[in-house]
Amino acid sequence: MRTGKWNAILTGACGIVAAVGMVAASAHADVTTEKGSSILVFPKVRANANYDTVIEITNTGNSMVHAQCYYVNDLQEWSKIDFNIWLTKQQPTHWVVSTGRRFDPTCGFGEDCSGFAPGLVPPVPDFEGELKCVEVTESGEPITGNHLKGIATLVAVTDGTEFGSDSRTAGDISTYNGVGIEGNPNAVPSNPLLLDGDTYEACPERIVLNYFASGADDPVATGASVFTELTLVPCSQDFETDTPGEVTIQFVVYNEFEQRFSASTTIDCFLNVEVSGIDTTTTPANSVFSRPVLGTDVASAVIMPIPGHGGLLGVAERVVARTPSDAGRAAYNLHTEGSLVPSTGPDSIRLVEPF
């Protein structure tokens, strides 16, 4: 259900407060975490009693940039909130997800804007899901300008109470780069956006997760165990009809001796799970992602959509915990390989109309 429409004009100093059966178009991966892009994805965003998230977005260009953004809340059966942001040239801005972005259009450059009124990036205080922003014209039509970069910072608000991947220490932070999809500067995109390697770059053919086996002893922090939380989102989405993407994926896992294990699961809109929960929900020690099954402390998992399904993007977060409330968390971007164009057609993103 479409729950809201917001607009934010952010200018000057005020803006700173806040595998098989698939065809690989090329050997390299086309998503980026370092360059300006036309589609910017933050796969893991949390705002609740235990966590919050700070979103930072920068316009790398020398003229004003507009973006149409979508929060997709997995806690409310794929509900969305869409809003627009405007960024002046070379301008960064940030906001806290739970409280949103505030803006006072009467506040001038260099003035104290601490008293500005509630503004137009919506607050979402009960949220777990993703944020996606697409570069558009002032009237909302998609363009391939490649001007968006971003960073998400996940903040633990409270101490944890359960040992494992949700272990946390209040005040601890964990940061990753937004995942960018570049557009072809010579292309004129239409709606839906086609991630076909011609208009926009395709999503990766494979994602590689390098991780410590669940429950392994941390080699540095004495007495601590390591857990890995994996977050994945489908590339294809329809924001006009509120239709989430669905991808069935296969995991091929290799331990330090190059022994091979496998698992599979289906992503419907959003997946956030400690890796041992991918193939078992009751006995983590029996998971192919766990130390007892793998027999080694570290492993590498190759993540591939099955034939006929679209692509996916994601991030991971490593948790090093001694107790539920004595833990450090570190997010990291995933290695990607190849360009995925399924035989059934490219991934696509349909924006809300009219423009």
Image (spheres, rainbow, N blue to C red):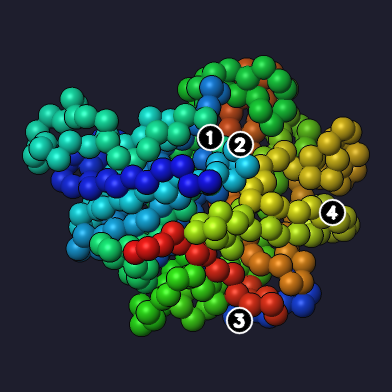
In three-dimensional space, the C-alpha distance between marks 2 and 4, rounded to whole angstroms, equals: 25 Å
Residue designated by label 2: 75
Q: Which mark is residue 127?
A: 1
Q: Can residue 14 be seen in this view?
A: yes
Amino acid under label 1? Phe
Precedes in sequence: disc 2 or disc 1: 2
Give the x, y percent position of residue 307: 76, 71
Q: Residue at x 60, y 75 (%)?
A: 346
Discs 3, 1 touching: Cβ within 8 Å: no
Precedes in sequence: disc 3 or disc 1: 3
Amino acid under label 4? Ala
Label 2, secondary structure: give it. Answer: helix
Q: Nearer the viewer, mark 3 or mark 2?
A: 2
Give the x, y percent position of residue 241: 54, 58
Residue designated by label 3: 25
Q: Which residue is drawn at 21% across and 60% down?
A: 64
Amino acid under label 3? Ala
In the image: residue 342, left or right of residue 36: right
Precedes in sequence: disc 4 or disc 1: 1
Q: Nearer the viewer, mark 4 or mark 1?
A: 1
Residue designated by label 4: 263
Residue 225's place in the image compared with 214, above or below, is above
